[in-house]
Protein backbone atom coordinates (compact mmCIF):
# COMPACT_ATOMS: atom_id res chain seq x y z
CA UNK A 1 0.00 0.00 0.00
CA UNK A 2 1.35 3.42 -0.94
CA UNK A 3 1.18 6.20 1.60
CA UNK A 4 2.67 9.62 2.21
CA UNK A 5 5.81 9.22 4.29
CA UNK A 6 6.34 11.40 7.32
CA UNK A 7 9.76 12.33 8.63
CA UNK A 8 11.20 10.04 11.28
CA UNK A 9 14.69 8.65 11.65
CA UNK A 10 13.51 5.04 11.14
CA UNK A 11 11.94 6.09 7.81
CA UNK A 12 15.08 8.02 6.83
CA UNK A 13 17.24 4.95 7.55
CA UNK A 14 14.87 2.72 5.57
CA UNK A 15 15.13 5.08 2.59
CA UNK A 16 18.91 5.14 3.01
CA UNK A 17 18.94 1.33 2.81
CA UNK A 18 16.86 1.40 -0.37
CA UNK A 19 19.20 4.01 -1.85
CA UNK A 20 22.32 1.98 -1.05
CA UNK A 21 20.88 -1.27 -2.41
CA UNK A 22 19.58 0.36 -5.59
CA UNK A 23 22.26 2.95 -6.38
CA UNK A 24 25.43 1.93 -4.53
CA UNK A 25 27.98 4.74 -4.54
CA UNK A 26 25.52 6.98 -6.40
CA UNK A 27 22.98 6.77 -3.55
CA UNK A 28 21.61 9.76 -1.71
CA UNK A 29 23.21 10.11 1.70
CA UNK A 30 21.18 10.22 4.91
CA UNK A 31 21.82 13.99 4.92
CA UNK A 32 20.41 14.28 1.38
CA UNK A 33 17.27 12.43 2.46
CA UNK A 34 16.86 14.57 5.58
CA UNK A 35 17.41 17.68 3.45
CA UNK A 36 14.57 16.65 1.14
CA UNK A 37 12.27 16.00 4.10
CA UNK A 38 13.13 19.51 5.33
CA UNK A 39 12.40 21.06 1.93
CA UNK A 40 8.88 22.49 2.09
CA UNK A 41 8.34 21.69 -1.61
CA UNK A 42 9.35 18.00 -1.35
CA UNK A 43 7.01 15.11 -0.64
CA UNK A 44 7.76 11.42 -0.13
CA UNK A 45 5.47 8.52 -0.93
CA UNK A 46 6.32 4.93 -0.16
CA UNK A 47 5.18 1.36 -0.52
CA UNK A 48 5.21 -0.34 2.87
CA UNK A 49 5.35 -4.11 3.36
CA UNK A 50 5.61 -5.70 6.79
CA UNK A 51 6.03 -2.25 8.38
CA UNK A 52 9.09 -1.49 6.22
CA UNK A 53 9.37 0.90 3.28
CA UNK A 54 10.31 -1.20 0.24
CA UNK A 55 10.01 1.49 -2.44
CA UNK A 56 9.66 5.23 -2.50
CA UNK A 57 9.46 8.33 -4.63
CA UNK A 58 10.45 11.90 -3.79
CA UNK A 59 8.69 14.66 -5.71
CA UNK A 60 9.09 18.44 -5.53
CA UNK A 61 6.04 20.54 -6.33
CA UNK A 62 7.16 23.83 -7.87
CA UNK A 63 4.40 26.00 -9.30
CA UNK A 64 2.88 24.06 -12.20
CA UNK A 65 5.48 21.28 -12.21
CA UNK A 66 6.01 18.07 -10.24
CA UNK A 67 9.72 17.26 -10.42
CA UNK A 68 10.47 13.64 -9.58
CA UNK A 69 13.76 13.77 -7.71
CA UNK A 70 14.23 10.09 -7.03
CA UNK A 71 12.40 6.79 -7.21
CA UNK A 72 13.67 3.43 -6.02
CA UNK A 73 12.35 -0.02 -5.14
CA UNK A 74 14.33 -2.68 -3.29
CA UNK A 75 15.53 -5.32 -5.78
CA UNK A 76 13.56 -8.07 -3.99
CA UNK A 77 10.33 -6.13 -4.66
CA UNK A 78 10.99 -5.00 -8.23
CA UNK A 79 8.80 -6.10 -11.12
CA UNK A 80 5.71 -6.17 -8.88
CA UNK A 81 4.17 -2.90 -10.05
CA UNK A 82 5.42 -0.81 -7.14
CA UNK A 83 7.22 1.80 -9.25
CA UNK A 84 4.15 2.12 -11.48
CA UNK A 85 1.93 2.67 -8.43
CA UNK A 86 4.39 5.24 -7.05
CA UNK A 87 4.33 7.15 -10.34
CA UNK A 88 0.51 6.98 -10.44
CA UNK A 89 0.41 8.36 -6.89
CA UNK A 90 2.70 11.24 -7.90
CA UNK A 91 0.45 12.04 -10.87
CA UNK A 92 -2.67 12.05 -8.67
CA UNK A 93 -0.99 14.17 -5.97
CA UNK A 94 0.44 16.59 -8.55
CA UNK A 95 -2.97 17.03 -10.20
CA UNK A 96 -4.48 17.90 -6.82
CA UNK A 97 -1.68 20.46 -6.42
CA UNK A 98 -2.77 21.89 -9.80
CA UNK A 99 0.43 20.87 -11.59
CA UNK A 100 0.30 20.81 -15.37
CA UNK A 101 3.12 18.33 -15.87
CA UNK A 102 5.48 15.92 -14.16
CA UNK A 103 9.15 15.92 -15.17
CA UNK A 104 12.16 13.72 -14.46
CA UNK A 105 15.64 12.86 -15.68
CA UNK A 106 16.86 9.33 -16.36
CA UNK A 107 20.17 8.01 -17.63
CA UNK A 108 19.94 7.36 -21.38
CA UNK A 109 21.52 3.93 -20.84
CA UNK A 110 18.91 2.89 -18.26
CA UNK A 111 16.61 1.34 -20.85
CA UNK A 112 14.32 -0.65 -18.49
CA UNK A 113 13.57 2.51 -16.49
CA UNK A 114 13.05 4.60 -19.63
CA UNK A 115 10.53 1.97 -20.78
CA UNK A 116 8.77 2.07 -17.39
CA UNK A 117 8.40 5.84 -17.65
CA UNK A 118 7.08 5.57 -21.22
CA UNK A 119 4.55 2.96 -20.06
CA UNK A 120 3.43 5.45 -17.39
CA UNK A 121 2.86 8.21 -19.96
CA UNK A 122 6.18 10.07 -19.94
CA UNK A 123 7.71 11.23 -23.21
CA UNK A 124 11.33 12.06 -23.98
CA UNK A 125 11.52 15.80 -24.65
CA UNK A 126 15.28 16.33 -24.62
CA UNK A 127 18.72 15.11 -23.67
CA UNK A 128 21.05 16.67 -21.10
CA UNK A 129 24.67 15.86 -21.95
CA UNK A 130 26.92 14.99 -19.00
CA UNK A 131 24.06 15.38 -16.52
CA UNK A 132 25.38 12.58 -14.28
CA UNK A 133 28.80 12.09 -12.76
CA UNK A 134 30.80 9.04 -13.82
CA UNK A 135 29.33 5.82 -12.50
CA UNK A 136 29.99 2.10 -12.67
CA UNK A 137 26.27 1.52 -13.20
CA UNK A 138 26.07 3.16 -16.65
CA UNK A 139 28.61 4.09 -19.31
CA UNK A 140 26.54 7.09 -20.35
CA UNK A 141 26.58 10.30 -18.34
CA UNK A 142 23.72 11.75 -20.39
CA UNK A 143 20.13 12.06 -19.20
CA UNK A 144 16.84 12.10 -21.00
CA UNK A 145 14.40 14.71 -19.77
CA UNK A 146 10.98 13.10 -19.73
CA UNK A 147 7.66 14.83 -19.24
CA UNK A 148 4.12 13.68 -18.59
CA UNK A 149 1.26 16.13 -19.10
CA UNK A 150 -1.26 15.95 -16.28
Image: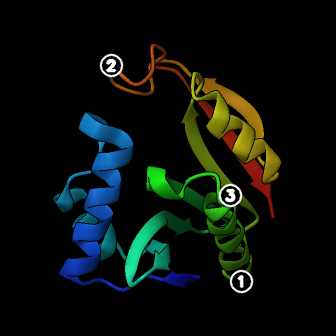
Name the element at disc 1: helix
Mark 1 crowd level (few <14, some 14–19, many ≥20, 10 Å Cα): few
How far is disc 2 from disc 1 in space, using C-alphas? Answer: 37 Å
Mark 2 crowd level (few <14, some 14–19, many ≥20, 10 Å Cα): few
Whether residue 43 is visible = yes
Q: Which mark is residue 96?
A: 1
For label 3, the residue is: 102
Q: Is residue 8 left or right of residue 4?
A: left
Residue ID at (81%, 47%): 119
Name the element at disc 3: strand
Q: Which mark is residue 134?
A: 2
Which corner quadrant of the image does residue 118 belong to?
Answer: top right
Q: Are marks 2 and 3 in contact (CB under 8 Å)?
A: no
Choose between 128 and 112: the one closer to the eye.
112
Question: Which sits earlier in the primary sequence, circle 3 or circle 1?
Answer: 1
* Residue 147 position within the rendered picture, expressed as x and y whole percent measured from the top left: 73, 47
Amino acid sequence: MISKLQFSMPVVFQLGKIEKECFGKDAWSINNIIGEFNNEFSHFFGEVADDVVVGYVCVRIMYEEAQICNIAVLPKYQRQGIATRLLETVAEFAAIQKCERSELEVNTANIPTVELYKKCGYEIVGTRPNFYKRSKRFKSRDAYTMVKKL
